[in-house]
Amino acid sequence: MKEEILALRKELHQHPELSGQESATASRIQAFVQDHHPTRIITGLGGHGLAVIYNYQNSGPTVAIRCELDALPIEEENTFAHRSHTKGVSHKCGHDGHMAMVSGLVYWLKEQAFSRGKVILLFQPAEETGQGAYRVLNDGKFKELDIDYFFALHNIPGAPLNSIITMQRGFSAEVQSLAIKLVGKEAHAAEPENGINPALAIAQITVALAELNFTDPQDDNFRVLTPVHLTMGQKAYGISPAAGELHYTIRTWNRERMVELKNSITNLVAQISAAHQLTHQVDWFEYFPASTNDSACNEYVDKAAKQAGLNTYARPYPFKFGEDFGWFSREYKSTMFGLGAGRKTPALHHADYDFPDEILDTGTKMFQAIISQILK
């Protein structure tokens, strides 16, 4: 492992930025590339995104390797020297490590003599909110890049260190968040019959949505509805409240099942609200399309792992979390794979998580092998 890559990873970890605010992170990556292997860089993609472009002599396939710029609104518990300097913000998903891996490709690309094609290193903003990939995809500067293949990885705590996790069906779930807003009529708490209190409707909606769960991940009808926030009224004990709000995140394996699930939720909320004489509104936000995997791209990943002598694990179904790489997989031949971060590494989004530096070289070498197969 090059010391500069390790130093970059720790520097990025010390200076995390939230989704949509990654200007200094992007500047650090841009400076690193310019210092080690200068080339054309497109800035401001979909916000603070960067595309680092390496063109070769003859026309040929264009391979894009994507990583993420953003961190999370989590206070770091770790006390090591490279801990976050930003209160309440830290890299708890390993995006600092992903950026370091992809940045490490510049050393290797500097030594290559490909006769054809193009390599694009994409540093994408705002993955955690599900907005970054969509904005990059719809940026005019990005559309001009004419990409043929898209690859990305994510570190996976709990999986054996440096193992490669592949999935035929896709990498991650289709995820959608929603807010259900109910409005009735206030009354004195002593005379609730003179108002319309949403409490019973909230209870009935919660039960009805729980009955929609189908949690067998092996089944195409898989769906999980998770209540994440609920509010009603205020701490004023003389008032029977008028308004209530429920927030959920829901997930399926594909777009078709998501459409069906959203329709079921909409109909249930309408029926229960009407039965209680409540007005209602359902707002949808933070959408992550399912990340599907192209079979040909999967083969490139499998061959790269074999060349590197790495243990591979064919996972039978996607991960349940959201990943906005799904926007790219809708438009391009794409694959996202997992890289084992160690069985004892704390889980993603936990306050004591830190990216394991032992897998930096592995990620970079996987991408090297994938690029070589396509451009050679």
Image (tube, rainbow, N blue to C red):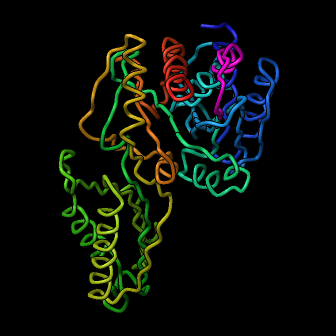
Q: Position of residue 235 (x, y in %)?
A: 46, 66
Quarter of the rendering occupied by the N terminus: top right
Quarter of the rendering occupied by the C terminus: top right
Q: Nearer the viewer, residue 138 or 116?
A: 116
Q: Say left or right for 106 vs 189.
A: right
Q: Find the magenta span and give its range.
A: 105-120
Q: Position of residue 192 (x, y in %)?
A: 33, 85
Q: Position of residue 296 (x, y in %)?
A: 39, 37
Residue beneath the point at 58% across and 37% down: 61
For residue 371, say whether it is visible. Answer: yes
Q: Quadrant of residue 258?
A: bottom left
**Is 107 part of what is drawn in magenta?**
yes
Q: Position of residue 314 (x, y in %)?
A: 27, 29
Q: Say left or right for 134 vs 153.
A: right
Q: Nearer the viewer, residue 68 or 120?
A: 120
Q: Nearer the viewer, residue 228 or 218?
A: 218
Count of labels in the image: 0
